[in-house]
Amino acid sequence: MRHVYFATFFLAVLTVSVLGFRGTRSTRPPIELFPDMDHQAHLKPQAGSTFFDDGRADRPIPPGTVAASAPLDDDDGLYHGMDADGTPLKAFPATVTVDAKLLARGQNRFTIYCAPCHGALGDGQGITKQYGMTTTPSYFDPRRVKLTVGELFGTITNGSPKTPEGKQNMLPYADKLSVEDRWAVVAYVRALQRTQVGTLNDVTDAAQKEALLKSK
Amino acid sequence: MSKLFPKSANRLPLQLVLYLFVLGGIASAGINYYATNKWANVGYAPVQPVPYSHQLHAGQLGIDCRYCHSNVEKSGFANLPTAQTCMNCHSLVKADSPLLAVVRESYATGAPVPWVQIHMTPDYVYFNHSVHVTRGVSCVECHGAIDTMDVVAQAKPLTMSFCLDCHRAPEEHLRDLTKPEQAVTKLGWVHPGGEAGQHDQGVKLVQDLKIMPPQSCSGCHR
């Protein structure tokens, strides 16, 4: 009987040494003890497919497709930041209300998508500058302060203007920021610019202006 | 007449029964330990086509998870970034790195980068990322401290009991999204009041936001 116990103990040690402990790192796909219906015959987002020639389950959208859920972009101001004749807007489109809520949303989106390069202050000193992204400009230089909201919106939507070599330093962010979010970011960028280039005349609230004058 | 069985054979039935109990115990302990995602899935760290380091990008650089996984608040599926997302920086930073050749090719041709999926739920499970992150469940709850992982490995078992533990006691995990420091993508955040503080905040959030995580079968198996 003793031998049986020895054999059992040996088998147990063997099992543990082969299977290892929990949480051990492994590059091999996990073992599925009960595959059941884990993998069903349907296409999943961003997954592969053997059916289509290019091996993708996601189908590229044919040109000219309009999403049923998306609004028709017949409002040039809201969707393109331009007048009907193609000049960039100088003021926010009528459907965008600039209020604290919009600015909060703008700050939230700005922190995620813009701050890595442009910096939390908009001074162009984002973290990527230390890693070789040297071309990021400051929002406070006079040329960029003069940009209209329509031009800012256009830059977010389509990326920065091409350099003489035909390269864009900033690529489009239209896939990451919805139209409404882009206007929110534009509003927040304007607010950031005011922090550096704003003057006393920008303060519209009389009491606040008085307080500022006193503090001087 | 010689004896057919030695005297020790009298004890044999009892010894056999005893042994079966021991064997049963070892077998149950083994199955309990190994026949679960805690062993099979946790620690899975496949080799990716690009040696992208979350520890560098999300940890050291502090880039928000949503910069790349940009649809996670809107979609049930947390998308992988497009090649253009990488090129936003890498057209200027390390633009000629051979490690990024796959990304540059993908950006030029539109062919996808063959990333290997790590965290998987079975196809009979419905899981929606957006409903979780927009109600204050942090990425870290299911994915672990990704921002400290040079190579991402599965950190949590993602079993049904793992899901239910949280669905039965959401207050232990919920964050207050009105406070920027508690954003779901701040993976290292813990409630300054400790477990008690988290519990009190969570109970309030569950009431205010009417959070009722489904515990019925059809909540997830639809």
Image: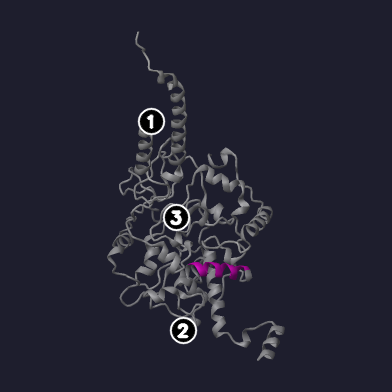
Sequence-wise, which precedes: disc 1 or disc 2? 1
Examine the structure image and report whether residue A103 is included in the region drawn in magenta. Answer: yes
Say if labels 1 and 3 share a chain.
no
- Residue A82 in the image: state x and y as whole percent: 50, 71
Q: Is residue B189 left or right of residue A86?
A: right
- Residue A16 in the image: state x and y as whole percent: 38, 42
Work out how far the residue at label 3 is from the one at label 2, CA to CA, in angstroms: 37 Å
Instruction: Read off the residue under disc 3.
Output: B79
- Residue B209 in the image: state x and y as whole percent: 66, 54
Give the farthest residue toward the front: B1
Q: Is residue A134 above or below residue B35?
A: below
Work out how far the residue at label 1 is from the one at label 3, CA to CA, in angstroms: 58 Å
Judging depth in this view, the residue of A39 and B203 nearest the camera is B203
On-image quarter of the C terminus of chain A = bottom right
Instruction: Read off the residue under disc 2.
Output: A143
Q: Residue at x 36, y 34 (%)?
A: A6
